[in-house]
Amino acid sequence: MLLESILTVLIINAIGLIWGYTQQSDKATDLFYSLSFIALTGVLWLTKADSLMHHLLLGMILLWGFRLGSYLFKRIHAIGKDDRFDEMRKHFIRFASFWTIQALSVLILSIPIIIIFQKATIKFGPIHLLGVAIWALGLSIETIADQQKFAFRQNSANDGQFIQTGLWKQLQHPNYFGEILCWLGIFICAIPSLENWEWLAIISPIWITFLLIFVSGIPLLKKASNKKYGSLKSYQTYQKNTPLLIPFVY
């Protein structure tokens, strides 16, 4: 089951790499990312699903994956291209490195999912309910934040402005906060099943937090936003007074 999971993710991302490089396009990159989770969970579910938690987890990943994939697919077609890949996609090794890291990230984030599906007849309890609730809260926050920002950008009256309304008034990156909650919720769902070394599954929410804060999320957006809006007094005030990622904490 573990081997099938790894092979599924590697094959999907290898196809994504070949397509992206030959087409010199990043319009399907995020689709392959979401599809990796959907396919991995689907393979596990078809192999072994005999508990309510197994069925719930499949539904959670399907809902999260289709929501995120469809939104990012719509966004990339609206803006035309992802500037992050302008130089990278021209060089196969650099481009392949990105897809390799993406595949590894999918597998790291999926550790709790893999562990849950390795356990037979899971008795659904309060901890599972808590995990599902946190996941649902995260998905709601992420969905609302993404839609608010997309609508803001589609309004020509907002050209040259940055969003600071709705959830974006409370946090600089509410969509990332929602994403972290989603993976934290999935990890919590795995807690009743964890034994010994399996507690390493906590790396899943830690990994997504690390990526968003230090690697592919906030640093890239902050660099682009500073370039666009750094001279605006309102933007400087917004950055100074608005929590970056976690309400009242950070």
Image (cartoon, grey):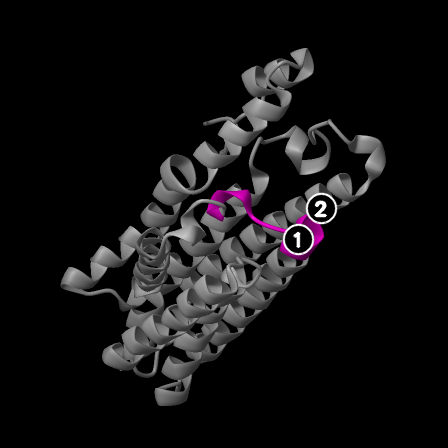
For disc 1, the marked residue is: 75
Q: Which residue is mark 2?
A: 150
**Viewed as shown, does residue 78 lie left or right of 196?**
right
- Comparing 111 with 224, the one in front is 224
Residue 216 left/right relative to 148: left
| Quadrant for the N terminus in the image | bottom left
Q: Where in the figure is residue 188, as x and y percent of width and height?
A: 38, 57
Badge 2 density bin: few <14, some 14–19, many ≥20, Cα 10 Å: some
Three-letter amino acid code at disc 1?
Arg
Pinpoint residue 98: horizontal percent, then vertical percent. 36, 53
Closest to the observer: 101 or 236? 101
Between the C-alphas of marks 1 and 2, the distance is: 7 Å
Query: Mark 1–mark 2 contact, CB under 8 Å?
Result: yes
- Secondary element at tag 2: helix
Q: Magenta span has 44?
A: no
Sequence order check, earlier mark of 1 and 2: 1
User: What is the magenta range?
Assistant: 75-85
- Residue at x 60% of width, y 56% of height: 72
Which element type, helix, strand or loop, lies under badge 1?
Answer: helix
Residue name at image x 30 percent, y 83 percent: 120
Our reading of the magenta stretch's main secondary structure is helix
* Residue 83, magenta (yes or no): yes
Name which residue lies at 45% across and 59% down.
Answer: 131
Q: Which quarter shows the C terminus?
A: top left
Amino acid beneath label 2: Phe
